[in-house]
Amino acid sequence: MPLDAAPRRILAVKLSSFGDVVHVTPCLRALRQAFPDADIRLVVERRWAGAVRALPYVDGLVEASSRTRVTPSYLLEAWRALAATPGRVDLAIDFQGTRRSAAWVYASGARVQAGRGWPRPLWHAALRPDLSRHAVEVCADVCRSVAAPVDDLAPELRTAPADEERVARFLDGEGIPRAGFVLLNPFSRWDSKGLDVATAAQLAVATASVAGERVVLTGGPDDAVRAAEVVRRAGACAVSVAGRLALPEALCLFRRARLMISCDSGPMHAAAALGTPVVALFGPTHPERTGPWGAEHVVVQAERPPVHHAYRRDPGRRFMGALTIDAMVAAVEGMLARTREPLREHAG
């Protein structure tokens, strides 16, 4: 869709979740390159805002709540938040394709409205994405529809110096090296995509053996109890920092790791975007759609699900249960053999 004039104010919408916010970062970079003088703002859920606050491609964030239904009060929230930003929006883009994200585009009153989803009355461009492609490519298709070519598809995150300093002190206090450690994230927002506690503990012990050092478990506040149980079972082979770092600080942790072993989750995508090699453990999802972006990463999957959304109907963790410790550790050994341990104190 050609634009008759370069937009002065752009509103990009990508509410959630963590990994999805990482996927849109190449488009934010492309929008800045296509429209260098525009004021670009990203609408993102408050809980994920810290992931992209340090990016240089956006002029500000519009932080949304995590409500799941589009109600009159939700629409009022959107209208009030947008009214607090200066000037009228010329171009609003929905990179998510849900009713909630579309509500922000409509509430913006933008002269040009576009994005993912169908039907979208009055929009200048509405895309039905090819869901067989990677989520990064789906976002890029949306961006291209508004005359912003995405030449570099690599997701990108940045860390802030103050967060790096706090994390360095935190690691010192925990007796963890400032860089070069192995991270294990056995958790996911959907239990069906994560490892059970017993398997995670076995993997931690085996990984510590091949790495020659204890493994650092990471996760969010909701994962802290399970992480503690993994450490109890793994003993001296593991230490947990789950739930103890704010999101911007967790990015610093991911960036400093020599390797992250992770289930299909936001931390997996964030680590890859920060340049950390990933061994990705996949079960009830398709890695060609949501795997870590980049050829340097390794995906381990024992049984392919019939559909990508099988994780919604796998309470017994059938697909993750098919993964063997031997297969996971072999992937870890291979990755460790190819990685060095640089001390990466800061990359702002």
Image: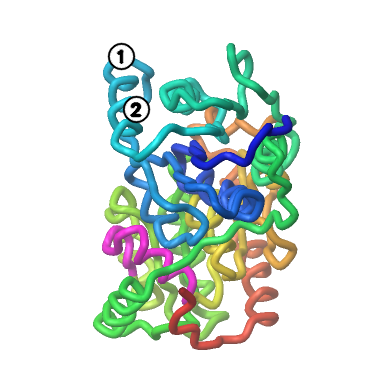
Under tag 1, what secondary structure?
helix
Give the label on residue 37, or none. Answer: none
How many C-alpha atoms fall within 10 Å of the one at disc 1: few (<14), some, or many (≥20)? few
Q: Is residue 258 magenta?
A: no
Give the camera-side residue of 100 and 268: 100
Q: Quadrant of residue 161?
A: bottom left
Q: Residue 51 at what x, y percent from top left? A: 42, 55
The residue under label 1 is which amino acid type? Answer: Pro
Q: Is residue 43 left or right of residue 335?
A: left
Q: Residue at x 49, y 77 (%)?
A: 347
- Give, as a three-letter code, the residue at label 2: Ala
Left or right of 249 in this view: 52:
right
Give the camera-side residue of 256 and 174.
256
Q: Is residue 248 magenta?
A: yes
Q: Is residue 294 above or below residue 78?
A: below
Q: In the rendered image, which quarter is residue 82 located in?
A: top left
In the image, what residue occupies the spot 58% across and 12% down?
121
x%, y% of residue 111?
Answer: 54, 25
Quadrant position of the N terminus in the picture: top right
Answer whether residue 186 is visible to the viewer in this image. yes
Q: Secondary structure at mark 2?
A: helix
Q: Residue 72: give its label.
A: 1
Please tell me how crowded label 2 is: few (under 14), some (14-19), or many (20+) other residues with Cα within 10 Å. many
Q: Could you tell which of marks 1 and 2 lies nearer the N-terminus?
A: 1
> Relative to residue 167, is residue 144 depicted above or below?
above
Q: Answer whether residue 286 is visible to the viewer in this image.
A: no
207 lies left or right of 79: right
Q: CA distance from mark 1 to mark 2?
A: 10 Å
Residue, far front: 5
- Magenta stretch bounds: 240-256
Q: Which mark is residue 78?
A: 2
Q: Residue at x 55, y 55 (%)?
A: 269
